[in-house]
Amino acid sequence: MALVPTTASNDASQLIAEVDMGSDSSVLTVRATVVQASTIFYDTPATLEKAERLLAEAAGFGSQLVVFPEAFVGGYPRGSNFGVCIGNRTPKGKEEFRKYHAAAIDVPGPEVDRLAAMAGKYRVHLVMGVIERDGYTLYCTILFFDPQGRYLGKHRKLMPTALERLIWGFGDGSTIPVFETSIGKIGAAICWENRMPLLRTALYAKGIEIYCAPTADSRDTWQASMTHIALEGGCFVLSANQFCRRKDYPPPPEYVFSGTEEELSPDSVVCAGGSAIISPSGTILAGPNYDGEALISADLDLGEIIRAKFDFDVVGHYARPEVLSLVVRDHPATPVTFTSTSTKAEDSCKK
């Protein structure tokens, strides 16, 4: 594996790691890139500008698929407690949530249109982590786009972790997509929902081949999870995380890292990245990178999927449905249903 310095960026810390998997013309090879970079917090227009610069750079190296981290657009509010303790929410915390809500995006909406245009402009499949605003509720969401500039759909995080449940809603079974594309079947799970065996099984059952895992976890133990998923699912795993320093967030007192602020300098690393690409055999093709912002790339030999499935196909020849099975409720879970709307829909179906 060789690390190649980028040439199109002004940030000298950005690198591309490339692995050549071979040149067998009978097997499709896909160049994929995971982006390891920080949000420009509370500034969604500037974050979109940064996303386009990174996307252009990855496309310049021939990438056909580019995966961004969890909550890249809208931001991951690391260190914040939004002024909450049991039984109380402070005015400052409520104002912090208002600003966070303002930085989120509507889906569909103008920012989604812009991301779609970027994917079309650079002719890439784009997987983007965003904070989605649906009325007054926020969701941690992944958006999917194709090289023709079309928005394909979204995945909402099913289970936010710990204090994330304070600020993000819960996804439902209607947004667990796997998209069939010209470079393979692409889907995603976000951060610790990758630890949910039944969710992974649902993705495997949909035939996922390129498993995207945007995350906010930079610990060493995350790599073990990613390798396990690659082996279990017989799929490529692309894990993208942000690399952030304290100075990438607003300064105190506007934004405070609860419990640790006094220990941090502007250059303190608050998320160390660890983005990586792993093959269906469990081989690390690129990364993990803990050095700084980076574009991390590898060439994916899709024939490796078939070779891995010969050993182990978790929803195929290695399944025992007469003993163990899974039911996925994949309809939207809405809190309010209006009977007049339902009656009109039924009447229209009868015509």
Image (spheres, rainbow, N blue to C red):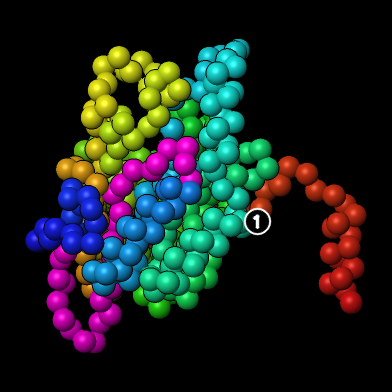
Q: Observer-nearest residue: 311 or 270?
A: 270
Q: For the stretch drawn in magenta, what is the main secondary structure?
A: loop
In the rendered image, residue 323, in percent from the top left (x then y), is placed at 46, 55
Amino acid on which the number 1 mark rests in the picture: His
Residue 33 figure quarter: bottom left
In the rendered image, residue 301, in percent from the top left (x then y), is placed at 23, 73
The residue sitting at 84% across, 58% down in the picture is 342
Specify the farthest residue to the left: 2
Q: Is 216 displayed left or right of 268 in the figure?
A: right
Q: Observer-nearest residue: 22 or 152?
A: 152
Name the quarter where the C terminus is drawn.
bottom right
Residue 81 in the image: above or below residue 8: above
Specify the farthest residue to the front: 10
Residue 291 in the image: above or below residue 50: above
SS at mark 1 in the image: loop
Q: Observer-nearest residue: 255 or 178?
A: 255
In the rendered image, residue 94, in percent from the top left (x then y), is placed at 59, 23
Label 1 packing within 10 angstroms: few (<14), some (14-19), many (20+): few
In the rendered image, residue 113, in percent from the top left (x then y), is placed at 55, 62
**Is residue 163 in sight in this rendering?**
yes
Q: Is 214 displayed left or right of 112 in the figure?
A: left
Which residue matches tag 1? Answer: 331
**Is residue 218 in sight in this rendering?**
no
The residue sitting at 64% across, 45% down in the picture is 134
Name the quarter where the N terminus is drawn.
bottom left
The residue sitting at 39% across, 20% down in the picture is 252
- Segment tinted magenta in the rendering: 17-44
**Can residue 278 be found in the magenta stretch?**
no
Residue 308 in the image: above or below residue 169: below
